[in-house]
Amino acid sequence: SFIDKNLKKYPVRIRINYGTWNNTEAVFGLIEDLTNEQEANLRFDKIFRNNSAVMAITDYDNHEYVDVNNIFVDLLGYERSEIIGKTAHELGLIYDDDVPIYLEAGAQMYKTGMFENREVRIVTKKGDVLTGLFSGQFIENHGKKFGLTVMIDVTERKYYESKLLENAI
């Protein structure tokens, strides 16, 4: 933190380099105000944590979950600590018949940077099967890439659609 002459505190990043100035050894300091970055991170965190859609952040390289939002934990029945550091495959989250759809969406994301509106069934910790409408894209933070995936639970809608079709026949 940095405190200005009015005793206001700022989040900062300080970088120190050694060099010469007018043929004299010197220490150079760069102080970067992180107020805007910190506020943006807090806004993102608030939106991410409390969003009504299931959201997950995965590592670009190994596909492990880095973070998941509250509804992800609530809907799927896992503790956050059971999820972080694991992949969807390791947790058995993807319904077996939908693995090809999941893999194709992932391939498209790596090719184009995103995918949208893929219907994939997932399996909760208790074994319930839910239907989700998935979209995803890559995001960057401090030069590192992550996958941001969003799922809207359409299980109930799919149930009522099937009932309507049954009654129409």
Image (spheres, grey):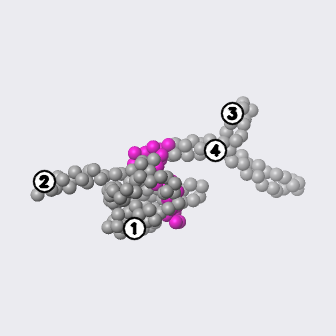
Q: How far is mark 1 from mark 2, CA to CA?
A: 34 Å
Disc 4 from disc 3: Cα separation: 14 Å
Q: Secondary structure at mark 4?
A: loop
Quick check: 144 left or right of 154? right
Other residues around mark 4 within 10 Å, as few (<14) / some (14–19) / many (≥20): some
Q: Nearer the viewer, mark 2 or mark 4?
A: 2
On the image, the x and y values in percent for residue 143 come to 59, 58
The amino acid pointed to by label 4 is Leu
Mark 4 vs 3, N-terminal side: 3
| Disc 1 target residue | 103
User: Which region is colored magenta?
Assistant: 46-69
For marks 3 and 1, give the CA distance: 50 Å
**Which image quadrant is residue 145 in?**
bottom right
At 72% from the left and 35% from the top, the residue drawn is 4
- Which label was assigned to residue 8? 3
Q: Which residue is mark 4?
A: 34
